[in-house]
Image: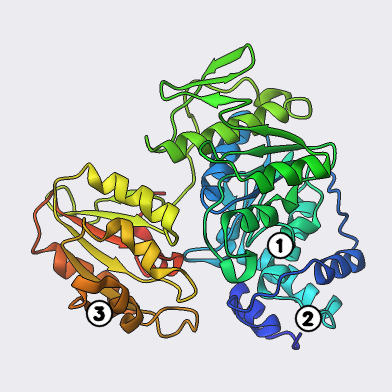
Amino acid sequence: MKTVLQANDPEQLLTHLVGPAQRIELGLERMQAAMARLDIPRQLPFPVVTVAGTNGKGSVVAYLEALALQASYRCAAYTSPHLWEFRERLRIDGQPLANQRWMSQIEMLGERVADIPLTYFELSTLAALRLCLEETPDLAILEVGLGGRLDAVNAVDADLAVITSIDLDHQQFLGPDRESIGREKAGICRRGRPLLYGDTNGPCSSVLAAAAACGAELQVLGRDFFLTATGEWRSGSVQYAVPPPLDDHPSQYNNLGLALAAAARLQKRLPRIWPPPAQWQVPIRLLGRKQWLRPWGAEGPRLLVDVAHNPQATGALAELLAREKAQVWAYWGMMADKDLAAAIAPLQGRVSGWTLLAMSENPRAAAPAQLRTVLGAAAGAGEIPLAELAQHLAERAATLAHDDILLCFGSFQVLSALPRYWFPD
């Protein structure tokens, strides 16, 4: 790592020390060495839940965090990536910590583990773990970054592990098919500890086999516990009415069902977290997942934003749009290492016009020419720099009807180009 830079922004300092977030090197050796030097125990002194999967991780974290906060427990939630500010990655009691708290940790790490070639995500995870130890929450929920077995978060021995769903994504790191990817995700399980798995249709045999080989206490959504479309959570003879998910797509029922099952398993250490409430009394903090916005008022068109960047996620987005009769105008930007053709296929017949986003400052991003190639019949799509997205949307909105839809999707970076004040607090 480089010497510490005088800066006021945690991300700027982090990038200076270890390089950009786009540098990905899987493996636990660096994390384990750094944790040993920093006296960060693998078994943290409070309950820890790790959440892995292809899609749905952020939703499960948000639901479980809300369940803990509603029960008046002090909760830490670590997620990635962030949208506007680096400090969004760690919430304590629902709120991000001050930048200076992050800066102090990153500066210390820059001095004490300078000789360990940590990545951006590894160093940020170490800083987050140190902050959690300072804050002493009643519960820490850690979202796994990429994969599972070799992800930095897996250097922590969690009390409970959750795998949301398995689909094709990050194949260059995790393997060419669902079974290979499932095997990597299942690396977060621990012997004798609960593993909750949420693929209700076609669970990966590799996940089931890995759980059996590890000796984890496997419970599968749709087999061992259920959340019905009428809002009833069931496990064995136990049944409760529960608060609603963020939307009525089956994937959100699955995500909420997993969070509820996690809360049930945490009851012995956090008694107030179970049974579940019938209604939400704290906000669900989740941005950019099939989220409807009205930045131009009731007379302007609707804005639909989604970070969807793989076939499973864009398929769910297409199902939502299939219910709409209005015209859809899409703004699309995505990383080049994604399966662009498969990701865009579910939306091809539903979009009236395309605008492609040039994210030239990100070396991982697909150029508009690459996006245009997979659009086929829509190859005449226009393109704009990502930095001009908000202005372009406002200009387009002035020409559309109030029920038309402007769709922005494909990456967290796409959403980060939109003004923060367009989103509800």
Disc 3 to disc 1: CB gap under 8 Å: no
Q: Secondary structure at mark 3?
A: strand
Image x and y of residue 382, in percent: 20, 78
**Depth check, front residue: 155 or 309:** 309
Which mark is first along the chain, 2 or 1? 2
Badge 2 crowding class, 10 Å Cα cut-off, few under 14, some 14 to 19, many 20 or more, is some
Image x and y of residue 357, in percent: 32, 76
Q: Which mark is drawn over residue 383?
A: 3
* Residue 357 seen by the camera: yes
Badge 1 crowding class, 10 Å Cα cut-off, few under 14, some 14 to 19, many 20 or more, is many
Could you give the CA–CA distance between mark 3 and mark 1, rounded to whole angstroms? Answer: 35 Å
**Depth check, front residue: 280 or 26:** 26
* Kind of residue at badge 1: Asp
Residue hosting label 1 = 151
Q: Quadrant of the N terminus?
A: bottom right
Could you give the CA–CA distance between mark 3 and mark 2, rounded to whole angstroms? Answer: 38 Å
Residue hosting label 2 = 117
Disc 3 to disc 2: CB gap under 8 Å: no
Q: Residue furthest top?
A: 237
* Kind of residue at badge 2: Pro
Image x and y of residue 361, in percent: 45, 85
